Image: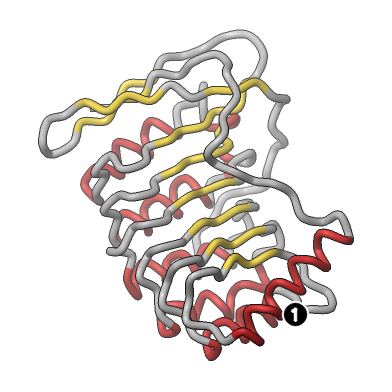
Amino acid sequence: TVRVMSFGGRAQWANFNLKERQVECEHVPELVSALLKPCLAPNLRMVSLEGNLLAAKGVELFFREVVCSRDTASFTTLNLSNNPRLGLDGMRYIALSLKHPQFGLKTLMLGSCGLEGKHLQRFTKALPEAVSLRLIDLSHNRLDDEAIEPLLEAAGGCERPRLALDVEGNRTSTGVFLRVARAARALELRGASRSMSVSSLADGQEVDFEIQTCEGRGLTQKDMESSSNADTDSDFAWV
């Protein structure tokens, strides 16, 4: 089951850290229902699903119902690192969402997901349409120069980059790695890059989140921090 406690007062930012909780596709409908509660959805800012067992079906549902929902206009950070079951279909759904008018993520983390060049072909083609993105973490995958170079160009290249790429720990040459670093430096000099860590959450009013895994173990998260009201978004439609 999923249980979310309501909260009062000023709008809060809601941050959910479900790292290494054995979340699988079968748990995603409950997770979606919890995150779309009227008391939480407008203030949802960060979800970490790092180190879980999400595959294509769960990714498709989560992106369609949560990431690309008009009700989650403040949702900016998603960590899907270390989900090795994403596969081609999972990345295809992520690529579709990049084109969606409601897509508003600024940080997307896909490190240690076993990604190869074939997984990024559609993602790279769709990337120019994801104008909100500021950071993509693709570290510690199996990406070579053939995959990274077009991705860097889709992100604006070295001279006019619009987002930062983290490609550390891949199969890139020194030259390509330095070009990616040069682009990140250009962003920094323009003051366009921001620190978007999902690991440091300020103290604040708590939200109690519980999801029951197939082993029957209850999972509880209490991660909230104060911030301002969220902006409204336009009509919702899925690609």
> Looking at the picture, does residue 7 appear above or below residue 109?
above
Pick the front one: 147 or 8: 147
Find residue 161 and report its horizontal and vertical position in percent. 78, 71
Horizontal side, residue 134 vs residue 102: left or right: right
Outermost residue toward the left? 215
> Looking at the picture, does residue 78 appear above or below residue 110?
above
The residue that appears at 41% across and 15% down in the rendered structure is 5
The residue that appears at 57% across and 46% down in the rendered structure is 77
Would you call the spot at circle 1 few (<14 residues within 10 Å), some (14-19), or many (20 or more)? Answer: some
| Tag 1: amino acid | Gly
> Looking at the picture, does residue 172 appear above or below residue 46?
below
Find residue 65 and report its horizontal and vertical position in percent. 44, 47
The residue that appears at 47% across and 82% down in the rendered structure is 171
To which residue does mark 1 refer? 157
> Looking at the picture, does residue 18 appear above or below residue 229?
below
Find residue 49 and report its horizontal and vertical position in percent. 39, 46
